[in-house]
Image: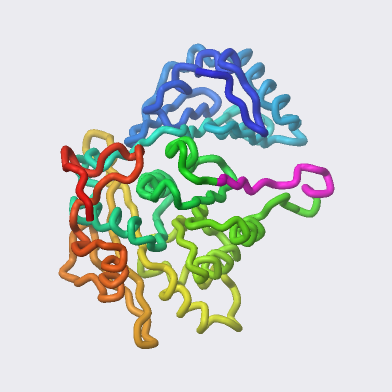
Amino acid sequence: MDEMKNRDILLDEESFGPLLPFIQDDAITDVDYNGKDLWLTDINKVKVKADASLITPKFIEVFINKVSMAVEQQFNPANPILEAESEELRITAVHETVTSTGRAFCIRKAPAVPRYDADDLIRQGYCEEKILALLINCIFTKMNFVICGDTGVGKTEFAKFLSGYIRPQDKVITIEDNPEWHYDKLNPGNDCIAIKVKKDKTKEGEKNNITSMNYTNAIKTCLRLNPSWIMLSEARSKEAKSLLECWSTGVKGITTIHTDNVLKIPDRFMNMIQNSRDADRMVNDIYDFIDIGILLRIKEMPDGASRRYIDQMCFFDREKEENHTYLLVDEGQIQDVAIPDSIHKKMKRAGILDPYAHAYVLTDYPKRVFGETEKKQR
């Protein structure tokens, strides 16, 4: 593994000591040490206890000190939380003075590798084949996606998978505070700008919670960079309004939010916008400019493994001054609901006559859509 270089943290392989094999293993997503036990979580959300005998107090002291020095942050009783990140890792440590179980740390991995493949998704029961084809065709048609679900269900990973079908010449701008999208690395040669939202680490900035580039400013800046797509890693607050305004200009995008039902997406956006004066107009904008809602869930299996899947999928639509939601997938099952006419019209304009037809590949990633399906001209 090459030395990890990032504007925030610089650690060489030697720094990770006995943790290095886990850092290098692409199947492992999280490395957690709780003060006495070492736990590993893999891409299937299987969590196992590893041999912690090599995680000595001396190693922990050296490792945390290296992280602390790399990001120029103190880690002591007065500053008991340490956070750092590299291009592919996010490290959080908690000082023993604020825990009863000892010094603890978590390493979350977000490598620039494709974790989802269309064939694998179908084989694992992630969704019906025709639904995956429909979603990919919606990317070709340039629609706006909101992906929701609880923490750890793979919202960003599925967003990354879908974004792999964007045309190389369409400029993509990603906006995130922790590097997870890696669009430029997963799609080399595509037109892309990656914007990182980052807090101002000066004393004055920390005192006033100032960010050198907040989400709202980042979205407004994007509009001056001539984007085709804006990928917001997560809509959390008032930036949701800026995102809708951006989408209203014709720019397309994908974002994620936390909610447990696609039917709650409009209300969740309204809560984030927090502007009752414009409430009626903003509700209509939500149905006008959000095309697709997707809810992801995890099903726990008897063997301890877990399976991610699309629990719900819907289209939002505003037609004849009325707002509608069309729930095509519910509880993982395809419903007897027709695709709205407005979606059919958009697809026909993009040259897609059958929304459920197998899509052909436009990019090197993902390498294929379904099995040995030959590339076909639409």
> Quadrant location of the C terminus?
bottom left
Q: Seen from this angle, which residue lies furthest front?
A: 377
Question: Which residue is rendered at x = 48% and y = 57% of the image?
Answer: 228
Is residue 45 at all visible to an observer of this figure? no
Along the line of sight, which residue is nearer the eye, 124 or 48?
Answer: 124
Task: State the image coordinates of residue 4 (x, y, percent, origin top left).
Answer: 58, 24
Residue range in magenta is 193-206
Is 20 above or below relative to 179? above
Left or right of 371 on screen, residue 108: right
Quarter of the image holding residue 346? bottom left
Residue 157 shown in magenta: no
- Of residues 93 and 350, the one nearer the viewer is 350
Residue 249 drawn at (x, y percent): 52, 69
On screen, residue 206 versus residue 198, left or right, reads right
From where the camera sits, is residue 42 visible?
yes
Depth check: give the residue in front, 31 or 239. 239
User: Residue at the location (58% across, 29% down)?
Assistant: 104
The location of residue 183, given as percent across then percent down, is 47, 42
Q: Quadrant of residue 279?
A: bottom right
Residue that appears at 45% across and 36% down: 188
Q: Residue furthest bottom?
A: 320
Membership of 202 in magenta stretch: yes
Task: Please tell me whether residue 293 is drawn above or below residue 320 in the rendered image.
Answer: above
